[in-house]
Image (tube, grey):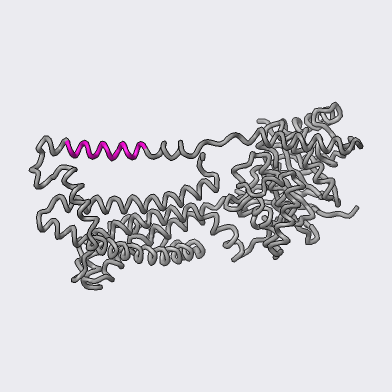
Amino acid sequence: MPAETVTQDRSAAEVSGLDALELGPRTQKTRRIWNSAWPKLLAVAIVVAIWQAAVLAEWKPVYVLPPPADVFTVLRDLVITADFWDGVRLTMTRAITGFLLAVLIGTIIGAAVSRFRPLRAAIGSLITGLQTMPSIMWFPLAILLFQLGESAILFVVVLGAAPSVANGLISGIDYVPRTWLRVGRVMGMRGLAEYRHLILPASLPSFVSGLKQGWAFSWRSLMAGELLVIVPGTVSIGVRMQNARDLFDSALVISYIIVVLIIGILIDQLFNAADNRLRRRWGLTEA
Amino acid sequence: MSTVVRIDDVSKQYGTGSSALLALDHISLDVRQGEFVCLLGASGCGKSTLLSLVAGLDRITSGTLDIGGRHVALMFQEAALFPWLSVAGNVELPLRLQGAGRAERRERARELLEVVRLGDFADKRPHELSGGMRQRVALARALAQKADVLLMDEPFGALDAMTRDILHDELERVWREQRLTVLFVTHNVREAVRLGDRVILLSSRPGRVIEDYAITHPRPRRIDSPEVSGQAAEITDRLRAEVARHAG
């Protein structure tokens, strides 16, 4: 074998040996799932235990604060009625419509603000201001503008969520690492290509955080809206809850609270799953 | 051999008036086709500034800088790979920007990853690789840019000694095989002598060329060989004298 080939083989072996040494073994998946699940289950158990203890201590009369078992029975009977699912469908339709509209508007505003300097000076801080505004403050105006209708609710849901979406995109674009931009420039990225291949993908994690926060705001605004703006002839979750209160049916009120909580958690989990997947792919978390 | 980069009497000043900072002061330097040139200096000598100027990321204040419209690629201490793309995707990106078709891109990226001996890692994500491997992907990506000149800004600065040693061999091999022209910035004297055909010593604040050493030891070299160590010691003394000038 010629000397040159021997040297080549040895250096190839050195390189791949070093690669193997530097890449460590991986952790197990089932263990990860269990590790994240048990604290949540424990937390639920603790809440139910405290609730049961409050009932046993007769802190409030049983018709005001019913025991968990009674509420779970009411809840079980509730979720098997078609009527209940009609309500959930109406509420979710409003939520999703409002959220998607907010994403559309928020993305356009965010992109425009991060692109044009004067626009940023003009409305950059206004967006953050809107974000801190309690959405319930908008309802009186919304009702004057749109009367008691779907548009009033939609208006407030969009106002609640769009600023978070816009801010997520803006900060994502702002914090694209300088080195990446330099690499892109040297590669010949300009204008639209720079946005498409570098700036937009690079701002994705921040944008997803913005979406998640935007969803939380739109869901809260929607619940406030459904309790305040009763659109005649509709039976959303909010309307049903209000009815249950009028009938002094505590178990039903608590059941609806649980339903809203569960929907909130489920959707939050969807966003978290998307977020975690992104972070894992990017190597932003210790997997 | 033809000149690839001509730096003639170039100065770079940041800011104006009393707060102005002169980063580079009348630098002249020619890099010829296929040459491996190391820029060496202490902090504040404007080594990185000079690379930015050659890369066209920054404007010179005076003088002439001519790269004859050639393509350059830039590598940093961090690999700066894009985390939303796979290893192959990162190498394909410059090809994509050049308008190459999908099949051609894939084929070329595979070849380039073979060049840096990472053929088996094409589908991995950058974060799944070690620091040294990421720098090799960055090298493959730089090669994909069809660059005539490879600008390297302390590319091995964040790596451990063993990895750096092996990557020196790798870079030397790729440089020879691909007939690259390299402008390599470092503050590590031995590294400069290990790799360079020439070592340009810069002074600090402002940056000026104070010495241009020709390194003629036969390749392949070892960073711990007596010849490399001996010449490195000589250059280090010169560098120390320069640093001492800034005392007080």
Asked whether the viewer can see residue B112, the reply is yes
Asked whether the viewer can see residue B24, the reply is no
Q: Nearer the viewer, residue B227 or A210?
A: A210
Q: Residue at x 82, y 50 (%)?
A: B178
Farthest residue to the bottom: give it: A146
Q: Nearer the viewer, residue B247 or A104?
A: A104
Residue A31 sits inside the magenta stretch: no
Disc tally is 0
Q: Quadrant of the N terminus of chain A?
A: top right
Task: Give the dominant element type of the magenta stretch: helix, strand or loop.
Answer: helix
- The quarter of the picture where residue A222 lies is bottom left
- The magenta region covers A38-52
Q: Position of residue A197 (x, y in %)?
A: 60, 60
Q: Position of residue A56 (x, y in %)?
A: 12, 36
Image: A180 above or below B188: below
Q: Position of residue A30 (x, y in %)?
A: 46, 38
Is A190 on the left or on the right of B187, as rendered? left
Q: Nearer the viewer, residue B173 or B53?
A: B173
Q: Position of residue A146 (x, y in %)?
A: 25, 73
Is B211 on the left or on the right of A183, as rendered? right
Q: Residue at x 50, y 65 (%)?
A: A116
Farthest residue to the top: give it: B226
Q: Residue at x 22, y 73 (%)?
A: A147
Q: Nearer the viewer, residue A127 or A20?
A: A20
Image: B180 above or below A236: above
Is A153 on the left or on the right of A203, as rendered? left
